[in-house]
Image (spheres, rainbow, N blue to C red):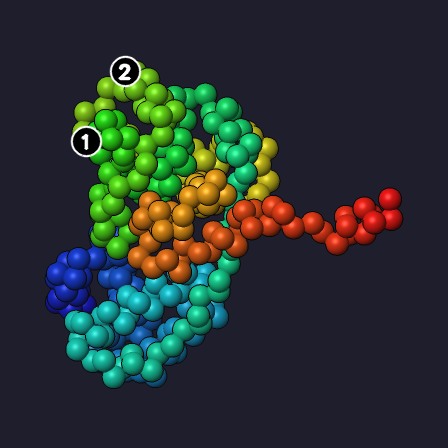
Amino acid sequence: MGKLRDQMLVDLQLSGAKPRTQKTYLREAENLAKYFHKSPEELGEDELKEYLLYLMKERHLSEGTFRFYVAGLKFLYRKTLKREWAVEKIRYPRAKRKLPVVLDLTEVESLFSVTKNLKHKTILMMTYSSGLRASETASLKLTDIDSKRMMVRVSQGKGGKDRYSILSQRALEHLRQYWRKYHPTEWLFEGAKKDDHITTHSIQLMFYAAKKRAGIRKPASVHTLRHSFATHLIEAGTSLHHVQMLLGHRSPTTTTVYLHVSRLNLAQVISPLDRAAQQIS
């Protein structure tokens, strides 16, 4: 699928797809061709449905990965092959609405206290205190830190959008200590190669190591720091609109999920079990 692959790559680049998305979509188009030993140009709706059932039933892909792969194949047929009819009836399960895991403030503090490496602590602190995705923390540049306005500029976040988030005074103090020790030049957090930034995978490993040392048993990932940031802001009385802006959510509906995990509206609610005990006493 050499020529077709080249055409699809051009279409992906013109659409503004990120390198990771380009790589995944191209790989899945190639996997489709390998599965049938035919070019996708020779395949239709029935073959696509058969392949998607194979991904779901035999490869047991996670829901998110499955939806991502379907999106890649739909891009191939809609944009590159101009064959909308082949995918217009392709459906996949709706995403299940799951409440995010949230750490309380003491658990967040325990993560920092058990992390002795200054670089690792600063990375985790920045991720939490500004509500960043791991990929956004990884790609921060020195010029993104505005200590005068106490803001952090997030360049090309999810959806290719720029935004500003808040800069914590405490995080800034750690950033200054970090800078004096490591002297980064362009990327705030340099990776193994000095001319490149740290990887998202490395940040994930830092988090899991800290979580283990802190004895936190919740099914938390580094993204949990972002969820916790949003929830703690709402519990502190920050408006949903401001939290939406800080997180870079396109729709306020996405941000409302944090109302469901916040204790703000439940703080005054007493369990009927406790109320019954009070009446008896």
Q: Is residue 35 above or below residue 102?
A: below
Measuring from the top left, give residue 214's x and y in whole percent: 56, 30
Looking at this rendering, what residue extends furthest in the right direction? 280
Looking at the image, tell me whether mark 1 or mark 2 is earlier in sequence order: 1
| Corner quadrant of residue 68 | bottom left
Please say whether residue 178 is visible from this viewpoint.
Answer: no
Q: Is residue 60 above or below residue 126?
A: below
Q: Residue at x 28, y 30 (%)?
A: 150
The spot of residue 105 in percent (x, y) is 52, 34
- Residue drawn at the location 49% of the way across and 53% of the way down: 259
Q: Residue tagged by mark 2?
A: 180
**Quadrant of the drawing holding the C terminus:** top right
The vertical placement of 156 against 3, above or below, is above
Residue 227 coordinates in the image, percent (x, y): 45, 46
Task: Label 1: state its secondary structure.
Answer: helix
* Residue 208 in the image, given as x and y percentages of width and height: 48, 37
Residue at 52% from the left image edge and 54% from the top image edge: 260
Number of numbered callouts drawn: 2
| C-alpha span from label 1 to label 2 | 16 Å
Instruction: Give residue 39's quadrant in the image.
Output: bottom left
Of the pair 24 and 128, the residue shown nearer to us: 128
Q: Amino acid at mark 2?
A: Arg
Residue 110 can be seen, yes or no:
yes
Residue on which disc 1 sits: 143
Q: Which mark is residue 167?
A: none
Q: Given contact means CB atoms under 8 Å apart, are the residues at marks 1 and 2 in contact?
A: no
The three-letter code of the residue at mark 1 reads: Thr
Of residues 209 and 254, the one drawn nearer to the viewer in this rendering: 254
